[in-house]
Amino acid sequence: EVQLVASGGGLVQAGGSLRLSCTVSGFSFDDYAIGWFRQAPGKERETVSCISSRIGSTEYADSVKGRFTISSDNAKNTVYLQMNNLTPEDTAVYYCAADRRTYYCFTSWNEYEYWGQGTQVTVSS
């Protein structure tokens, strides 16, 4: 059974940092793309970043490039999203998700099959 558990959200001041974790079970990193997504109140869910371990690919939304870094620790079955220089516009519920694919990972959220619960990130000004 594929399972994802997201954690690490919280309240931080603008300019601060958080690291989100997505611990997975039931599948191999090599066979799946894993993505981070976010949804702010009243807005569409958007793709933030993703990683395809098989092809060594990481992708980022333009709004987070240079500030967020996605990485994976296969030994811990965990994907991380390091978020630096946070702004109030980053406030949202963040989700991690997985999809069985080894090709391009930066696609719409509705192309991902398996989802973890969300974790709230709130950035105060």
Image (spheres, grey):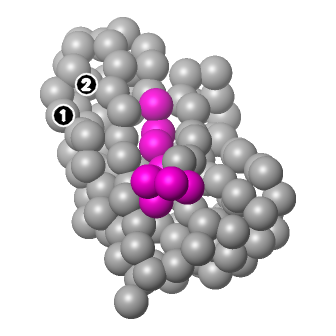
Decide: few, some or many residues near mark 2? Use Cα within 10 Å; few <14, some 14-19, many ≥20: many
- List x then y, in percent, for residue 60: 65, 41
* Residue shown at the point (23%, 14%) measured from the top left: 13
Residue span colored magenta: 74-82
Residue in the picture at 77% in, 63% down: 54
* Local SS, label 1: strand
Q: In the image shown, does 109 or 79 lie closer to the viewer?
A: 79
Image quadrant where one finds the C terminus: top left
Please name the residue that numbered disc 2 is placed on: 123
Do the CB atoms of the residues marked 1 and 2 lie less than 8 Å apart? Answer: no
Q: Does the magenta portion include 34? A: no
Q: Quadrant of residue 31?
A: bottom right
- Graded by Cα atoms within 10 Å as few (under 14), some (14 to 19) or many (20 or more), the crowding at tag 1 reads some
Lateral position of residue 68 relative to residue 106, left or right:
left
Foreground mark, 1 or 2?
Answer: 1
Residue in the picture at 36% in, 41% down = 20
Residue 35 x %, y %? 54, 58
Label 1 sits on what residue type?
Answer: Gly
What residue is shown with label 1?
Answer: 10
Mark nearer the N terminus (1 vs 2): 1
